[in-house]
């Protein structure tokens, strides 16, 4: 990553994108990218053909020419930044071409707006017909697009005026916190139009985005305050097909979050081993009778000695994502399973929600008056998979948990698995293959699992969950591609030994959790950082575990 400064403007260049654009020290744009996404929403990787940066007095120009890796398309991105009389203008131009029609779901500019100074703030929107609308950036996470038909945006971030104009396509906005991204996203090709569409010789892409920045920052003293919070219970996720082991060898006493299909064989159920106090996530096959399926599963579980403390069930079609307005799958909806669950598992707490991301939870919300708890899970690589983007998702998690609490009323949050890699893909037939173990979005086999990076990520998740009152969540699986290895297993052991304790939590570039019997410290950045207790330097994306028990 290369950083560039021109007067009050500072930005970074990473893999052809503009990252972390600041004006007078205030972040005004998190990222400007130009992905080409296939019919399954996977992002086509590219190879750089030419990259050039020219720095001149009062002006910088960046050029990036690229081609699809293994796919026939080429592109050229040009960004020019000029500064004059204390104001700045960033003009970005994009051209995409393909010699034959290529089916894509997106091809063009994507702008990511930061959360700090933006969430809940006023926003002025200019539509394609020239009309203007006064609205606000969502405070709680919006289940659907908060703004449609965008030709321009104007708002203020901590004293900096930001004006954005788009040409070449109509844009709309989504609240990316739904997918754990720490941003609002303005993207091209409205979702109401047919997908996929063709990028080809008769349909090239030509777009321009122009951003004007002015004003002076309203300085706010940067301070990370410690907060007292109760540490959530940490669970171990287990699922046939993804895990081969019924328990983690080094953490055999950790409570389990078991996912099972309602029609699973007796051999599969017996393989979990007898238990009391574990939680069940049940997937109901499409077309099955809920009462009969759940009653039968409960009887077969009891026969092998499994008596869960918590249960939730989801019809299999709801493992996929649906727009808030539908259409919804035929057959029973998630809330239709609450009564059959209570009948099949008397004495167990019955939950509502989803087995995928907050997106699906937010779009198909449970009735808190009819459930004992709510649940959803999370992955860090729905939209982007570079190291910086993964760590940035930690900034969004407290806002996700807060939005979930608002929807849950007084009911506790017993959440699912939160991992870097994707457990299942609600947006396509399956997770994308990753034979080269690259940093790719929407893959299950992420190369950071088991490296220590995943441990730093888990500490950030745990800290955000603690300060927002999450009762429990899983941080890894017993084994397999999302298994707990190395430092991640040690982080989970540290947290499991202190579940329910009141701790002090600091969330910033360095995340710290302090209990009376130890400390958990994570560097959630890509730079070396000093530990908050004066114990030396922390390597990028790493953890220090102090156990005084």
Image (spheres, helix red, strand yellow):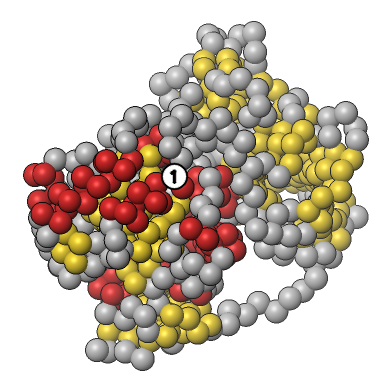
Q: Position of residue 358 (x, y in %)?
A: 50, 51
- Please determine whether, in this image, residue 542 is positioned above or below residue 343: below
Nearest the viewer among 52 and 31 is 31
Q: Position of residue 535 (x, y in %)?
A: 39, 85
Residue 466 visible to the viewer: yes
Residue 464 visible to the viewer: no
- Please determine whether, in this image, residue 349 is positioned above or below residue 90: below
Nearest the viewer among 31 and 502 is 502
Q: Is residue 79 left or right of residue 524?
A: right
Q: Position of residue 308 (x, y in %)?
A: 24, 61
Where the C terminus falls, by quadrant? bottom left
Q: Residue at x 82, y 64 (%)?
A: 159
Residue bearing the label numbered 1: 336
Q: Quadrant of residue 161?
A: bottom right
Q: Residue at x 65, y 16 (%)?
A: 204
Q: Residue at x 39, y 46 (%)?
A: 337
Q: Is residue 473 left or right of residue 78?
A: left
Q: Position of residue 467 (x, y in %)?
A: 51, 75
Q: What kind of element bears circle 1? A: helix
Q: Quadrant of residue 196?
A: top right
Q: Residue at x 15, y 49 (%)?
A: 300
Q: Count neighbours of disc 1 (C-alpha within 10 A) and say few if under 14, some if 14 to 19, many if 20 or more.
A: some
- Please determine whether, in this image, residue 312 is positioned above or below residue 132: below
Nearest the viewer among 448 and 431 is 431
Q: Is residue 253 left or right of residue 58?
A: left
Q: How many marks?
A: 1
């Amino acid at each position: 990553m290369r950083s560039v400064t021109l007067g009050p403007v500072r930005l970074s260049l990473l893999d052809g994108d503009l990252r972390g654009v600041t004006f007078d020290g205030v972040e005004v744009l998190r990222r400007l990218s130009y992905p080409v996404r296939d019919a399954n929403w996977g992002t086509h990787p590219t190879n750089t053909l030419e990259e050039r940066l020219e720095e001149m007095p009062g002006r910088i120009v960046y050029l990036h020419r690229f081609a699809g890796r293994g796919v026939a398309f080429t592109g050229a991105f040009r960004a020019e930044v000029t500064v004059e009389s204390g104001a700045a203008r960033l003009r970005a131009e994009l051209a995409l071409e393909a010699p034959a029609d290529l089916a894509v779901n997106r091809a063009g500019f994507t702008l990511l707006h930061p959360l700090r100074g933006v969430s809940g703030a006023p926003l002025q929107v200019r539509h394609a017909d020239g009309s203007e609308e006064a609205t606000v950036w969502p405070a709680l996470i919006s289940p659907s697009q908060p703004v449609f038909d965008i030709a321009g945006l104007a708002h203020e971030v901590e004293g900096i005026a930001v004006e954005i104009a788009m040409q070449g396509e109509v844009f709309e906005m989504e609240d990316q916190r739904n997918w754990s991204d720490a941003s609002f996203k303005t993207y091209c090709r409205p979702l109401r139009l047919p997908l996929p569409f063709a990028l080809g010789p008769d349909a090239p892409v030509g777009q321009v985005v122009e951003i004007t920045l002015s004003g002076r920052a309203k300085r706010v003293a940067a301070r990370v305050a410690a907060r007292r919070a109760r540490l959530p219970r940490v669970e171990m996720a287990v699922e046939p097909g993804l895990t081969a082991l019924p328990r983690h060898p080094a953490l055999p006493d950790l409570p389990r979050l078991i996912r099972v299909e309602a029609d699973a064989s007796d051999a599969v159920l017996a393989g979990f081993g007898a238990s009391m106090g574990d939680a069940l996530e049940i997937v109901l096959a499409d077309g099955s009778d809920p009462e009969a399926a759940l009653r039968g599963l409960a009887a077969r579980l009891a026969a092998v000695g499994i008596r869960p403390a918590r249960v939730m069930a989801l019809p299999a079609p709801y493992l996929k994502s649906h727009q808030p307005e539908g259409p919804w799958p035929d057959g029973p909806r998630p809330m239709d399973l609450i009564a059959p669950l209570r009948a099949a598992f008397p004495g167990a707490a019955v939950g509502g929600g989803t087995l995928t991301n907050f997106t699906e939870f937010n779009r198909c919300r449970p009735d808190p008056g009819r459930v004992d708890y709510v649940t959803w899970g999370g992955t860090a690589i729905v939209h982007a998979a570079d190291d910086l983007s993964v760590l940035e998702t930690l900034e969004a998690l407290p806002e996700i948990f807060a939005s979930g609490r608002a929807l849950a009323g007084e009911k506790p949050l017993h959440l699912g698995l939160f991992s870097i890699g994707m457990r299942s893909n609600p947006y396509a037939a399956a997770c994308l293959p990753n034979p080269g173990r690259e940093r790719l979005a929407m893959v299950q086999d992420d190369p950071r699992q088991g490296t220590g990076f995943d441990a730093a990520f888990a500490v950030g998740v745990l800290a955000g969950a603690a300060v927002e009152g999450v009762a429990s969540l899983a941080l890894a699986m017993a084994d397999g591609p999302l298994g707990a290895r190395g430092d991640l297993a040690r982080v989970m052991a540290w947290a499991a030994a202190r579940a329910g304790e009141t701790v002090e939590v600091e969330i910033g570039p360095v995340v710290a959790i302090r209990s009376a019997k130890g400390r958990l410290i994570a560097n959630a950045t890509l730079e070396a950082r000093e530990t908050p207790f004066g114990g030396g330097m922390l390597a990028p994306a790493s953890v220090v575990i102090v156990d005084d028990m």
